[in-house]
C-alpha cells in the first residue's frame, strides 16, 4: 500500500503533537505509615509516603513545610518521611501536597487519630475436642487492630486476618490452653488465656 505524499509529510507533525501533549494530571500521593492514621499519646508520629508523576515531582509539603529531600526532587517516584506531634486528644488533620514541574498540585488529607486504649478481646466460644482447642472470638480497637497472634506452648502463630476496628478470629490448636494476643496500630497489646472448662 502506498501513502499519499501529503500524508507522509503530515505524519511527523502528528507524532510530534502526540508526544508533546501537555501534562494534565497532578501527582499521585500515597501514605504508608502510620497504619490507619493511629498514633499513641505522648509520641511523635512518623509519617512515610510517596508521590508519583510521569513528568517528575518537584515538591512535597506537609502543613506548608517542604518535606521532600533535595536528592529526590525531579524524580518520577519520590519518597518522603517526616515527624509530627501526636494530638493530645481526638484527631488532627494534616494536608500533604505534591507538585509537578508544570505547577499542578494534588492535596491529600491525612487524619491522625489518638489511640489511647489497647485492644479488647472477646471470646465467644472455647471448646476442647479430641485433644484440640477451638477458640472463636473478636478483637476490637477504637482505631484499628493490626494483628492477632495465638501462643500455645512455645509456638507463636500470627493469624492471617485483615486489619480493622473489629477483627473476628477462629483458632484451632493442639493444646489444652492458648493465649490470644491482639496488637493495635500503635503497638498497644492485650492478651487473654483461652481454656475450655468442660469437654462437650
Image (cartoon, grey):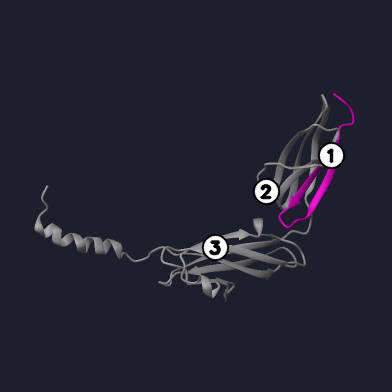
Dot 2 surroundings within 10 Å: few (below 14), some, or many (20 or more)?
Answer: some
Residue that mark 3 sits on:
50
Residue that mark 1 sits on:
153
Dot 3 surroundings within 10 Å: few (below 14), some, or many (20 or more)?
Answer: some
The image shows residue 194 at horizontal and vertical percentages of 84, 38
Residue appearing at x 46%, y 65% in the figure: 76
Mark 2 touching mark 3, by CB under 8 A? no
N-terminal of the two: label 3 or label 1? 3
Q: Quadrant of the C terminus?
A: top right
Residue appearing at x 77%, y 47% in the figure: 182
Residue that mark 2 sits on:
164
Alpha carbon separation for disc pair 1 and 2: 28 Å
Circle 1 or circle 2, nearest the eye: 1
N-terminal of the two: label 1 or label 2? 1
Q: In the image, is residue 47 above or below residue 123?
A: below
The image shows residue 164 at horizontal and vertical percentages of 67, 48
Mark 1 touching mark 2, by CB under 8 A? no
The image shows residue 63 at horizontal and vertical percentages of 59, 72
- Magenta residue span: 179-200
Tag 1 secondary structure: loop
Residue appearing at x 71%, y 41% in the figure: 159
Is 144 left or right of 122, judged from the image as shown? left
Amino acid at each position: 500500500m502506498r501513502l499519499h505524499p501529503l500524508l507522509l509529510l503530515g505524519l511527523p507533525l502528528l507524532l510530534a503533537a502526540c508526544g508533546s501533549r501537555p501534562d494534565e494530571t497532578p501527582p499521585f500521593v500515597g501514605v504508608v505509615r502510620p497504619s490507619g492514621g493511629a498514633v499513641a499519646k505522648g509520641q511523635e508520629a512518623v509519617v512515610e509516603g510517596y508521590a508519583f508523576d510521569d513528568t517528575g515531582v518537584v515538591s512535597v509539603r506537609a502543613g506548608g513545610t517542604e518535606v521532600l529531600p533535595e536528592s529526590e526532587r525531579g524524580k518520577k517516584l519520590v519518597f518522603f518521611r517526616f515527624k509530627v506531634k501526636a494530638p493530645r486528644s481526638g484527631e488532627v488533620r494534616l494536608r500533604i501536597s505534591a507538585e509537578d514541574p508544570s505547577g499542578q498540585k494534588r492535596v491529600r488529607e491525612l487524619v491522625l487519630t489518638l489511640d489511647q486504649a489497647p485492644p479488647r478481646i472477646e471470646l465467644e466460644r472455647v471448646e476442647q475436642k479430641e485433644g484440640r482447642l477451638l477458640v472463636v472470638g473478636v478483637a476490637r480497637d477504637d482505631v484499628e487492630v493490626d494483628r492477632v497472634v495465638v501462643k500455645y506452648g512455645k509456638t507463636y502463630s500470627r493469624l492471617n486476618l485483615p486489619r480493622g476496628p473489629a477483627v473476628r478470629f477462629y483458632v484451632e490448636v493442639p493444646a489444652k490452653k492458648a493465649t490470644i494476643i491482639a496488637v493495635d496500630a500503635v503497638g498497644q497489646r492485650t492478651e487473654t488465656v483461652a481454656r475450655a472448662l468442660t469437654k462437650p
